[in-house]
Amino acid sequence: MGRSFYHQRKKKLICILQKIKNMKTTKIIFWITTIMIFLFEGVMPALTSQSEMAKQGITHLGYPLYFGTLLAVFKVLGAIVLVIPKLPNRIIEWAYAGFGIDFICASISMAAVDGINGMAFFPLIVLAILATSYICRQKLKTQV
């Protein structure tokens, strides 16, 4: 298993990296991941932030209700920023940073209140999707 397993994994990684170098592939990955973030962090909060379940979730974590509304507003604004292609880079960078902080803090909050479980890791999965979007965005910027 040793050498041949790692050799196969290395070959697979090289193949994946070669595909990512392709601008078309990078653009597809960028838009898929960015749209996923837009849906998770823009559309869903806009539609559900005032629901009873959302309010219970915010109070369960120990936050005041107005924090949920504030969070929803900034999530929607940040998601809009990510899908508008020609905005200044600094604004887009702030949106990525804000979402990154949001996902890390959400994971910490859930782990602190409910213990380390699957729900505490979900924001980190979304953070990985965000990171993929960001990395692809950077590659597309350097290829232009």
Image (cartoon, rainbow, N blue to C red):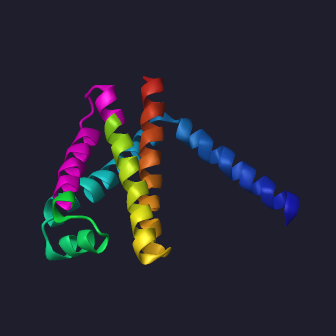
- The percent coordinates of residue 22 (x first, y second) are 52, 36
User: Which sits in the foreground, 99 or 132?
Assistant: 99
Name the side, left or right, on which 5 lies relative to 40: right
Report the quarter where the N terminus lies.
bottom right
Q: Is residue 144 above or below residue 76?
A: above
Number of marks:
0
Q: Is residue 88 above or below residue 81?
A: above
Predominant SS along the magenta part? helix
Q: Is residue 118 above or below residue 32?
A: below
Mark yes or no: residue 15 visible: yes
Name the side, left or right, on which 25 lies relative to 72: right
Q: Is residue 103 magenta?
A: no
Q: Residue at x 42, y 77 (%)?
A: 114
Report the quarter where the C terminus lies.
top left
User: Which sits in the foreground, 5 or 134?
Assistant: 134
Quadrant assignment, res 103: bottom left
User: Which sits in the foreground, 19 or 33?
Assistant: 33
Q: Residue at x 29, y 59 (%)?
A: 40
Quadrant assignment, res 80: top left
Q: Is residue 92 magenta?
A: yes
Q: Residue at x 36, y 53 (%)?
A: 102
Provide the residue span drawn in magenta.
68-93
- The percent coordinates of residue 101 (x first, y second) are 39, 49
User: Which sits in the foreground, 62 or 95?
Assistant: 62
- The percent coordinates of residue 10 (x first, y second) are 74, 50
Quadrant assignment, res 82: top left
Mark yes or no: residue 33 visible: no
Q: Residue at x 20, y 50 (%)?
A: 76
Name the side, left or right, on which 78 lies relative to 98: left
Q: Is residue 141 above or below residue 34?
A: above
